[in-house]
């Protein structure tokens, strides 16, 4: 009796904690409740529509050692899920030494249920979630994709990965032999999963789709392989469309051979934008009060800066001409002159370079990340006047858009400030979140920077840009609207030298009604070894999108 | 006219206490239980309590299975809902709409009137 009592005492008192721990290890199972990744919506007017959604799919596997009706298995799965199966099914099922062979992937729920009903021994299913893109490759370089580890790559998927991932929940509970959680016990934990945010983009799917088509048509016309178009609302900084070619299908991202297709060049590829930058140089001169549209200078089609001579691409507009005239004909000499007048009027000195740097970098936001929510944004570069390379020649080139590397999103955002009254809105592609009922909760507005140029300067440059477009291309626009724009044709560097036979075509413009500018469009077309012109290769794409937008936005004409 | 006042005085505390509890009944059972009967009764009570506990525990577990069934149904319906959302998104995608018979039958307006 004493031995018995002693043994009981040992087991129940002394070893109590050990056995409780062993029992808990066997009976209590932690189950992860996976959080759902947030969806991505675009706008269709004022309603959110899904661009990226989740779908449950199934991987079908076999344990060949237990499959006993091979012919029935083969006929059933081929009948139900023919397109999702591996090609060598007989070979996979004959590997009797293996316990796990994948027979098919991405089966739908209906397919999986039909096969399950047949009670095929040795056949199992593994559930997983995959991203589905109902609009195909629409805005793919803005969206990015989710890799096999469930991590967002490129675009919104990468930049907002944390917000969209959510947090897995935990269910820790005593389970029965088949794993069913039971409420008995006092160590149960039930922490619900917190799903990721559903993100609503500012991208309008109709504008995006039309812009992509217009870009494709434009590139086909120019026989150019690369092009980008960004459409923005200048009154808010919201990006309405970002189209790039070549592009890719995010549902087939693993088949892409050139990873550069994943980048969004509008935010990640700085370049020398060319003559469209003259609008910024002019705005700087206007804002500092050193020039007006009607001020004149003596154009000789060339101007000497240091040991370099800068010439005009368009010759013959010589004599005393106005700066409006210089803008209409995109004369380099005019804007080098503006740059000189920012200093002592005869030379590009420290004062003029400092002023231009201040406006370009600090006022217009060039050569710094805009903070747009698309992964891979590159700041580009503007050589500061304090650098040895920031000399007069450099700054004379910058006056007409060469010698600086900046992105399209920087230029379009700065341009919005030029035409909207002088307010810089940080560009954004995130319009808010969408709740489970499909309602849009708008994102708080980012604080704008007011007065980057004065309202008077903005009004003047707005009119100058309008006049510059109307001088040659008025007939291309719908009558009764306020459309303005500026071409850009920039040389590119090949082996450290600027060349004329490989140029990048750009067009930068706005459109609106009598009240204000309603959209800003920037177009870029390029290709190795191609001599492309802003007015021939980029402008038609702008015009196409602009005329369509007037109808889509239901803008009313004058009169 | 004169009134006579009557006042009761108790001679001591014991008499007062007795009066307050005068309805108290002292019951003395005529059945006498021995130690074996006591033990059997206690065992019976423990058994009944055990059965009550087991009934409750079993009932709780059966609720767990019910809850599990409902959870499975919810998960199944949620998957079906997701599938329908995917199908809905595909059917309302721009490409699908543009290629629909309705869209093909549409004509461009000849003129637009603006309300000024």
Image (cartoon, helix red, strand yellow):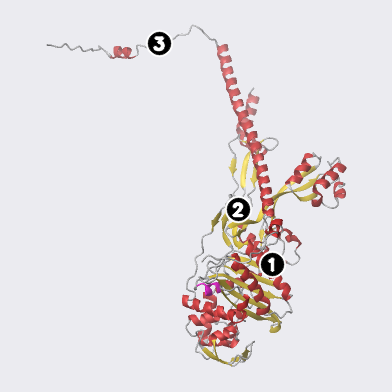
**How many neighbours does mark 3 have within 10 angstroms: few (below 14), some (14-19), or many (20 or more)?**
few
Is residue A543 left or right of A248 when viewed as pictured?
Answer: left
* Secondary structure state at the residue bearing disc 2: loop
**How many neighbours does mark 2 have within 10 angstroms: few (below 14), some (14-19), or many (20 or more)?**
many
Dot 3 corresponds to which residue?
B25
Quarter-wise, where is residue A414 in the image? bottom right
Q: Which of the two discs, 1 and 3, sits closer to the camera?
A: 1
Q: Which of the two discs, 2 and 1, sits closer to the camera?
A: 1
In front: A409, or A377? A409
Magenta stretch: includes residue A374? no
Disc 1 and disc 3 in contact, CB within 8 angstroms:
no
Residue lying at the far top in this picture: please name it: B30
In front: A229, or B31? A229
Is residue A205 left or right of A63 when viewed as pictured?
Answer: left
Q: Give the magenta-colored segment's residue range.
A: A415-420
Q: Which of the two discs, 3 and 2, sits closer to the camera?
A: 2
* Secondary structure state at the residue bearing disc 3: loop
Helix, strand or loop for the magenta stretch, by majority: helix
Please determine whether, in this image, residue A168 is positioned above or below residue A313.
above
**Chain ID at mark 2:** A
Dot 1 corresponds to which residue?
A213
In front: A454, or B99? B99
Please determine whether, in this image, residue B113 is positioned above or below residue A438.
below
Quarter-wise, where is residue A11 in the image? top right
Using the numbered discs, state the Cα–Cα distance from disc 2 to disc 1 in whole angstroms: 32 Å
């Amino acid at each position: 009796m004493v031995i018995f009592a002693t043994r009981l005492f040992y087991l129940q008192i002394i070893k109590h904690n050990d056995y409780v721990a062993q029992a808990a290890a066997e009976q209590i199972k932690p189950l992860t409740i996976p959080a759902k990744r947030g969806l991505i919506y675009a706008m269709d007017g004022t309603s959110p529509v899904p661009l990226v959604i989740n779908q449950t799919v199934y991987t079908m596997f076999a344990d060949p050692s237990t499959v006993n009706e091979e012919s029935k298995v083969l006929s059933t799965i081929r009948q139900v899920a023919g397109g999702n199966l591996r090609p060598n099914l007989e070979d996979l099922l004959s590997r009797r030494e293996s316990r796990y062979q994948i027979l098919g992937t991405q089966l739908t729920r209906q397919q999986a249920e039909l096969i399950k009903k047949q009670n095929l021994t040795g056949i199992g299913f593994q559930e997983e979630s995959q991203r589905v893109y109902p609009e195909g490759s629409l805005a793919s370089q803005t969206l990015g994709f989710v890799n096999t580890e469930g991590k967002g790559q490129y675009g919104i998927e990468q930049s907002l990965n944390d917000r969209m991932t959510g947090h897995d929940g935990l269910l820790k509970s005593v389970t029965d032999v088949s794993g069913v959680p039971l409420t008995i016990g006092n160590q149960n934990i039930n922490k619900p999963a917190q799903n990721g945010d559903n993100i609503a983009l500012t991208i309008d799917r109709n504008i995006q789709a039309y812009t992509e088509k217009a870009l494709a048509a434009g590139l086909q016309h120019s026989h150019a392989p690369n092009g980008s178009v960004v459409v923005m609302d200048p009154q808010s900084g919201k990006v309405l469309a970002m189209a790039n070619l070549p592009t890719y299908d995010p549902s087939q991202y693993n088949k892409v051979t050139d990873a550069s297709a994943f980048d969004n060049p509008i935010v990640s590829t700085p370049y020398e934008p060319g003559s469209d930058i003259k609008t910024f140089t002019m705005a700087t001169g206007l804002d500092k009060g050193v020039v007006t549209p009607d001020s004149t200078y003596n154009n000789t089609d060339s101007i000497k800066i240091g040991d370099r001579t800068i010439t005009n691409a368009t010759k013959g507009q010589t004599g005393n001409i106005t700066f409006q005239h210089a803008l209409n004909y995109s004369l380099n000499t005019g804007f080098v002159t503006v740059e000189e007048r920012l200093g002592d009027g005869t030379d590009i000195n420290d004062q003029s370079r400092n002023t231009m740097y201040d406006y370009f970098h600090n006022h217009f936001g060039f050569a710094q990340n805009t903070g747009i929510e698309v992964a891979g944004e590159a700041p580009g570069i503007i050589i500061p006047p304090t650098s040895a390379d920031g000399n007069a020649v450099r700054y004379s080139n910058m006056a007409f858009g060469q010698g600086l590397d900046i992105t399209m999103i920087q230029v379009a955002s700065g341009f919005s400030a030029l035409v909207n009254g002088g307010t810089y809105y940080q560009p954004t592609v995130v319009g808010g979140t969408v709740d489970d009922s499909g309602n849009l909760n708008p994102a708080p507005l980012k604080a704008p920077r007011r007065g980057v140029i004065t309202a008077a300067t903005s009004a003047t440059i707005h009119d100058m840009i309008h006049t510059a477009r109307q001088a040659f291309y008025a007939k291309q626009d719908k009558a009764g609207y306020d459309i303005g724009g500026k071409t850009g044709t920039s040389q590119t560097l090949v082996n450290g030298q600027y060349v004329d036979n490989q140029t990048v075509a750009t067009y930068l413009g706005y459109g609106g009604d009598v009240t204000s500018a309603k959209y800003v469009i920037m177009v870029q077309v390029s290709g190795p070894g191609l001599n492309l012109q802003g007015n021939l290769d980029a402008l038609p794409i702008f015009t196409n999108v602009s005329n369509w937008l007037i109808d889509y936005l239901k803008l009313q004409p004058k009169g | 006219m004169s009134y006579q006042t009557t006042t009761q005085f108790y001679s001591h505390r014991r008499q007062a206490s007795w009066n307050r509890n005068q309805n108290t009944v002292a019951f003395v059972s005529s059945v006498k239980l021995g130690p074996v009967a006591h033990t059997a009764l206690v065992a019976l009570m423990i058994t009944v309590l055990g059965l009550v506990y087991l009934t409750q525990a079993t009932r709780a577990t059966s609720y767990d299975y019910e809850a599990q069934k409902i959870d499975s149904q919810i998960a199944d319906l949620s998957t079906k809902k997701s599938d329908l959302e995917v199908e809905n998104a595909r059917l309302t995608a721009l490409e699908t709409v543009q290629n629909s018979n309705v869209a093909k039958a549409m004509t461009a307006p000849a003129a637009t009137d603006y309300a000024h």
